[in-house]
Image: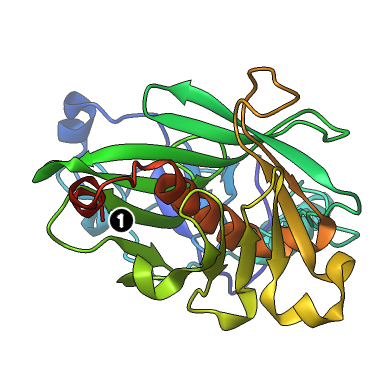
Amino acid sequence: MPSTLESNSTFFLSPSPTRISRNDWETHESLDSFFVPSITIERPSSPVSITSQLSSEPLDSALWDQRNSYLLNHEELTIDTSRSASGSSSYASSFHSESQASPMSRSTTPALTEDPPDYTTTVQRPTDPVQYEFSPTSYNSMIVMSGSDAQAPRPKYHIAVTMNCFMPLCHITTIRRGGSELGQYVAQFEMGISQGPSTVTIDGSQVLISSALSKRTGTRSAGIWLWTPPDKAKGVLWNCRTVPFSCRSVIDIGSGSEESLLANFTPAGHDHGQASVAKLTVRPKGQHFFDDLLLSLLIIERKRLTPGKGKILKQLFN
């Protein structure tokens, strides 16, 4: 059945599955004229292939290669539309308009009618004091878990203690966010029996613990400790003379006791005379100081619980 295509259109021709046998090929006395039953027409610029059965037309034998393939070499094919039936003009027009359309315009994917949702999660700070418990998870690690949260309890920090392989009596404490050792790094400090001084690494800087933490008054086990981190605005003052220990903001001490109070800490085994885990109650304002609260508290507890009687024994621990 003849088909009508728009004039001056560029196409590629390839043979249909119909093959010409070698015997048929050799029986032709002249290769100048023979007939191809069908032709596949593909428009290169369109991803859609259109197959049209055309009436047999004489073709130039020079355009056939040894594989019996018809090559047009990107030549322009002009089809005389005067011989076509008028009823097929609508098909040619629709084919031309469709082939000119871009693949995106023919996509069946529905268009977006609104902006994608915002997946950013904003964590709100507590408006009431939150109590956290120090719960052991293995022989050398523990987590800081919220115990009074209205929602399901979830770990706030992961604390792990490892050994310095070059000095086994010196231990490294690492603090990370979340409930595992894969959480975001916060800080670490190294203390123990070592010739070198103890150090703390926070905010990418390693400093001596003696330059960041100092005992202002009292004894080693019951004193007042001043924590001065690289960010001076987060300096805190721990009062360990009475249980629970209290922690206050240095820059707000002059504003009143309630205004400067950040947290309270109850060591393990001091909850109404019964054995219990250590607990830390953080006020809403103290959430902003949490990293420094926890880091300074762990160092103070290490110092406070280390034997300090006797000059020789005291010098063993840095």
Q: Is residue 56 above or below residue 83?
A: above
Circle 1 sits in a helix, a strand or a loop, which is it? loop
The count of marks equals 1
Q: Which is more toward the observer, 288 or 124?
A: 288
Question: Which residue carries the number 1 mark?
Answer: 71
Q: Quadrant of the N terminus?
A: top right
Q: Which image quarter: residue 267? A: top right
Residue 313, given in percent of the width and then of the height, sits at: 22, 45
Instruction: Indicate left or right for 256 with 203 as reference.
Output: right
Q: Which is more toward the observer, 239 or 183?
A: 239
Q: Which is more toward the observer, 49 or 111?
A: 111
Residue 318, given in percent of the width and then of the height, sits at: 26, 56
Pick out the residue farthest to the top.
274
Residue 1 visible in the picture: yes
Q: Which image quarter: residue 307? A: top left
Residue at image location 35% in from the left, 61% down from the top: 72
